[in-house]
């Protein structure tokens, strides 16, 4: 399209009408104006006092002869009749014709007055712009030139629209095509000003249920410090919602786009750390291969278009709903506005709200198994007579979120007080040296380097069991921790906690 426009323009110029030439020069205009005092050229009577304007130089050649001049003492005669007399040298002299020293000016120069010129008693309109040119071409029935002008204008308009769309799409990240806000004209808008939730239960309930079943390990429910209250052994998905927030998607997509590719980050690691990271990540990928190859879950994951070069994964994150209770049975989030689940839907994940006393410090925690994530989704049964009634029958909710893991630092020991990942060289912040550690070894005995450096950093931290320091919050499940907004809560599903099948 951008090539077609100049080609059409050149063609239109090449076939332009001959009588729409370039304007006369100042010298040509002055030569014409000099003829007025001598009476060689008479201005049009209706335009005698009009301002001077320019006209195409090629039109000068089409001008009519000037009005005749009647000499004193001669008899009146018809303006177009010539009276010949013999001069002193015997040559005929034509009265009524102007005499000029430059014979070429006789039919090539004209007084340009206002927006009209005199030519054989007729008035020719001066060309002001493209509209006049188009009218002239239509009048002359020059259809090819008319088609070129109209086609060129349309081509330019279409090109302008296409460029505007391209600029708009480059300003904001494009949302997933399967979103309702992405399947219409929203990809062509400059802003992602929408914040909606859509019920996709009918479409995705079988998929999410299968993913939940694949990551449920009944024997490990109720095991560990965080899961001691669990008496249920399986989950039944009841509702699936998709969260489409343009503003939060912009933040996530931008953060993901600036995340270095995993392969590039590995090249900056020292050999020993690189080999250890590659081997551990291959093990994680092998565990996720089962769900990616599943005939139900696999197509769903493929449709999401996850960025494998930056290790984008779909991970679980449990968070309490309104009415959630503590381990003593007391309601700690009475209303929806106070519930963490609702806050995440409205504002997205915020790593600043994490506790530095967590096993891997202050960040946003995710799990690749619902068995682990469920332990953070809250309690809901009332406690009659102050006794724990168990968790069977409770209804909770959980996020299935996009997480750009990037290049992780994979560890098998706790890292309390951590606020950002180590660098690609394995250096942790020097300020951690004096940090208070409640569980596990103090930082000066963890066997890691504490140093102030300017190296590029890892993108996340993964706790890969078994943990060597017997941290009370450690389990047999991996935990993925993000310290920046490289995660997006795309799906929220509600589920019921059930007893073992009989």
Image: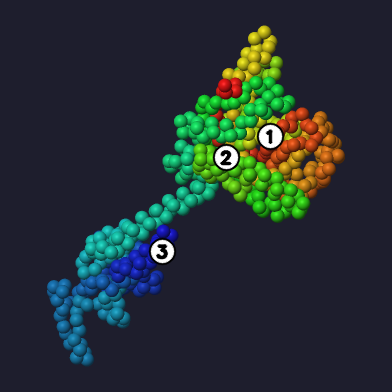
Query: Quick check: 57 left or right of 477?
Result: left
Q: In the rendered image, which residue does mark 3 sit on?
A: 6
Does 320 sit above or below residue 453?
Answer: above
Q: Could you give the CA–CA distance between mark 1 and mark 2, rounded to whole angstroms?
A: 16 Å
Q: Is residue 14 visible?
A: yes
Frontmost residue, 29 versus 217: 217
**Could you tell me which quadrant the C terminus lies in?**
top right
* Local SS, label 3: helix
Disc on res. 205: none
Q: In the rendered image, which residue does mark 2 sit on?
A: 291
Frontmost residue, 240 versus 255: 240
Residue 115 x/y as whole percent: 31, 61
- Crowd around label 3: few <14 · some 14–19 · many ≥20 (10 Å): some
Residue 57, image quadrant = bottom left
Residue at 20% of width from left, 76% of height from top? 96
Q: Are marks 1 and 2 in contact (CB under 8 Å)?
A: no
Query: Quick check: 452 left or right of 478?
Result: right
Residue at 61% of width from left, 31% of height from top? 216
Frontmost residue, 258 versus 64: 258
Residue at 21% of width from left, 69% of height from top? 120
Does 281 sit above or below residue 92?
Answer: above
Q: Point out the tag, 1 or 2, that comes first from the N-terminus.
A: 2
Q: Is residue 251 visible?
A: no
């Amino acid at each position: 399209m951008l090539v077609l426009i100049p080609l059409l323009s050149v063609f239109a110029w090449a076939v332009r009408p001959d009588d729409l030439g370039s304007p006369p020069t100042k010298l040509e205009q002055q030569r014409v104006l000099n003829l007025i005092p001598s009476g060689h050229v008479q201005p049009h009577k209706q335009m005698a006092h009009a301002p001077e304007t320019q006209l195409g130089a090629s039109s000068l050649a089409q001008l009519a002869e000037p009005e005749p001049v009647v000499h004193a003492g001669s008899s009146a005669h018809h303006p177009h009749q010539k009276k010949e007399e013999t001069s002193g040298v015997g040559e005929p002299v034509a009265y009524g014709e102007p005499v000029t020293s430059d014979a070429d000016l006789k039919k090539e120069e004209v007084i340009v007055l206002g927006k009209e010129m005199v030519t054989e008693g007729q008035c020719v309109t001066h060309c002001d712009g493209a509209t006049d040119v188009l009218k002239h071409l239509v009048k002359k029935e020059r259809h090819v030139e008319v088609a070129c002008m109209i086609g060129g204008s349309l081509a330019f308009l279409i090109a302008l629209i296409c460029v505007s769309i391209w600029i708009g799409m480059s300003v904001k990240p494009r949302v997933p095509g399967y979103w309702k806000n992405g399947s219409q004209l929203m990809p062509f808008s400059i802003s992602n000003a929408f914040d909606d939730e859509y019920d996709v239960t009918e479409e995705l309930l079988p998929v999410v249920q299968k993913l939940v079943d694949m990551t449920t390990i009944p024997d490990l429910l109720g095991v560990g410090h965080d899961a001691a209250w669990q008496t249920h052994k399986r989950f039944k998905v009841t509702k699936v919602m998709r969260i489409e927030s343009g503003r939060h998607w912009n933040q996530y997509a931008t953060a993901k786009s600036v995340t270095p590719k995993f392969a590039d980050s590995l090249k900056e690691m020292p050999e020993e750390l690189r080999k250890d990271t590659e081997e551990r990540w291959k093990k994680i990928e092998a565990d996720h291969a089962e769900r990616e190859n599943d005939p139900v879950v696999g197509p769903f994951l493929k449709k999401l278009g996850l960025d494998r070069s930056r290790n984008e994964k779909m991970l679980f994150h449990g968070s309490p709903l309104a009415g959630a209770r503590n381990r003593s049975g007391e309601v700690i989030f009475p209303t929806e506005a106070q519930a963490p689940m609702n806050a995440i839907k409205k504002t997205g994940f915020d790593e600043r709200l994490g506790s530095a006393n967590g096993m891997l410090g202050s960040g946003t925690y995710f799990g690749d198994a619902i068995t682990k994530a469920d332990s953070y989704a809250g309690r809901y049964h009332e406690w009659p007579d102050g006794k724990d009634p168990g968790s069977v029958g409770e209804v909770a909710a959980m996020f299935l979120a996009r997480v750009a893991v990037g290049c992780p630092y994979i560890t098998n020991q706790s890292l309390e007080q951590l606020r950002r990942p180590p660098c690609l060289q394995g250096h942790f912040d020097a300020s951690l040296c004096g940090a208070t550690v409640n569980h596990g070894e103090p930082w000066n005995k963890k066997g890691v380097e504490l140093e102030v450096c300017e190296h590029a950093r890892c993108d996340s931290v993964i706790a890969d069991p078994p943990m060597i320091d017997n941290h009370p919050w450690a389990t047999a499940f991996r935990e993925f921790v993000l310290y920046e907004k490289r995660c997006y809560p795309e799906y929220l599903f509600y589920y019921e906690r059930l007893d073992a099948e009989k």
